[in-house]
Image (cartoon, rainbow, N blue to C red):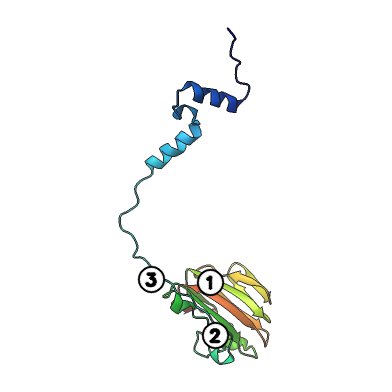
Amino acid sequence: MAKSKKPTSRSAAQSAVRKRSSGRKTAARSPARKAVKAKARTTPAKSSARKAPRPKQRIAVSHHREEDFKADGLRAYAHYRDLGISAATHGLAQAHVIRLLPPCNPAEVSKLHYHDVEFQMVYVLKGWVKTYMDGQGETLMQQGSAWTQPPKIKHMILDYSDDVELLEVILPAEFKTVELKA
């Protein structure tokens, strides 16, 4: 009678265990897998109070038209081109192109403030802008530069080129701006 050879590798050993266990797959499972399943079972159930579903978003398409730049935004020294994101997302987010009007007047522009937002990102499409952000100091942002501003970070514009254009994305679409004493 021939002796059976012992398995020489871990996978061979696991295979032998599977064959011996007459079809029981649990014998071949690793302890790590069992631990993961056990962990999942001990996780507390989520609260039954759920947020109301957001309204369905729609597609927003915006093509460049000079007449879409309006002086109806947050700052008097800027013209804004709304990209239709606020309406398409039912107020979840806002996106617009901002043209800062030349020449830069630091007495009007350089006012320390913050926005009560969840997210804010700015991308320089054209020109340059010099900003101040609390904890960051002064930074020169040029065409192609992008930055985020954490919620309620104190900041201000210090200077900008005559041709500056910025793309700004903010969540939520409606938010409060608070001007501070410098």
At label 1, which amino acid type do we have? Answer: Gln
- Local secondary structure at mark 3: loop
Q: Residues within 10 Å of mark 1 (few under 14, many from 20)?
A: many
- When the figure is inspected, residue 82 is found, relative to residue 30, above or below; the finding is below
- When the figure is inspected, residue 150 is found, relative to residue 174, above or below; the finding is above
Are discs 1 and 2 less than 8 Å apart at CB?
A: no
Q: Earlier in the sequence, mark 1 or mark 2?
A: 2
Q: Residue furthest front?
A: 1
Q: Residues within 10 Å of mark 3 (few under 14, many from 20)?
A: few
- Of badges 1 and 2, the one in the foreground is 2
Q: Residue furthest top?
A: 1
At label 3, which amino acid type do we have? Answer: Pro
Query: Could you tell me residue 98's position as x and y percent?
Result: 58, 83
Residue beneath disc 1: 120
Residue beneath disc 2: 81
Residue 2's mark?
A: none
Tell me, yes or no, if residue 74 can be seen here: yes
Residue 55's mark?
A: 3
Query: Could you tell me residue 57's position as x and y percent?
Result: 43, 72
- Of badges 1 and 3, the one in the foreground is 3
At label 2, which amino acid type do we have? Answer: Arg
Q: Residue at x 52, y 91 (%)?
A: 71
Q: Earlier in the sequence, mark 3 or mark 2?
A: 3
Are discs 3 and 2 less than 8 Å apart at CB?
A: no
**Quadrant assignment for the N terminus:** top right
Left or right: residue 137 versus residue 87 is right
Query: Could you tell me residue 14's position as x and y percent?
Result: 54, 26
Tell me, yes or no, if residue 111 can be seen here: no
Q: Earlier in the sequence, mark 1 or mark 3?
A: 3
* Distance of label 3 from label 2 (alpha carbons): 24 Å
- When the figure is inspected, residue 36 is found, relative to residue 25, above or below; the finding is below
